[in-house]
Image: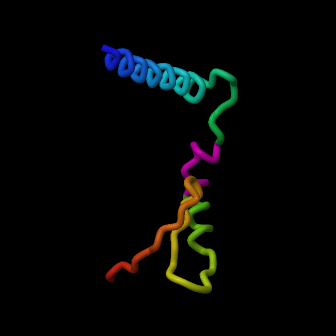
Amino acid sequence: MSGKYIISAILGSFGVAWVCDYYVSEKKLFGGSTPGTITNNEWAEETDKKLQAWPRTAGPPVVMNPISRRNFIVKSRPE
C-alpha cells in the first residue's frame, strides 16, 4: 500500500520539477533572453574553426566541445 504513495510522490516531484524548469528556462520567468552566441550559427562555426586551429604539441589530436568541455579523440579518416 505504501508503494503507490512512494511512486505517486516520485512522479509528482518530477512533474513539479519539469513545470519549474519549463517556466524558468523556456518562458523566461525571471526575465532575460537567450544569448546571441547560442542562437547565431555563424558564431558556432567560427568558434569551431578557432578550436580546431589550436596547435597540438603532444598526444593524439582532440576535438574540444565548448558546451560540455569534454575532449574527444579524433580518429583519422580514410581518404
Residue furthest left as drawn: 1
**Which quadrant is the C terminus positioned in?**
bottom left
**Residue shown at 46% from the left, 73% from the top:** 73
Task: Give the colouring mode of the picture.
Answer: rainbow
**Image mark count:** 0
Q: Is residue 41 magenta?
A: yes
Relative image position of residue 22 (x, y in whole percent): 52, 25
Quadrant in which residue 69 is drawn: bottom right
Taking 59 as reference, is 55 left or right?
right
Quadrant in which residue 42 is drawn: bottom right
Q: Is residue 79 magenta?
A: no
Foreground pick, 70 / 4: 4
Magenta stretch: give its range.
Answer: 36-44
Relative image position of residue 13 (x, y in whole percent): 47, 21
Residue furthest bottom as drawn: 58
Relative image position of residue 58 (x, y in whole percent): 58, 85
Foreground pick, 41 / 63: 63
Foreground pick, 27 / 46: 27
Taking 18 as reference, is 44 left or right?
right
Relative image position of residue 75 (x, y in whole percent): 40, 77
Quadrant in which residue 1 is drawn: top left
Residue furthest front as drawn: 1
**Residue shown at 69% from the left, 29% from the top:** 32
Q: Main secondary structure of the magenta part?
A: helix
**Residue shown at 44% from the left, 74% from the top:** 74
**Residue shown at 64% from the left, 21% from the top:** 29
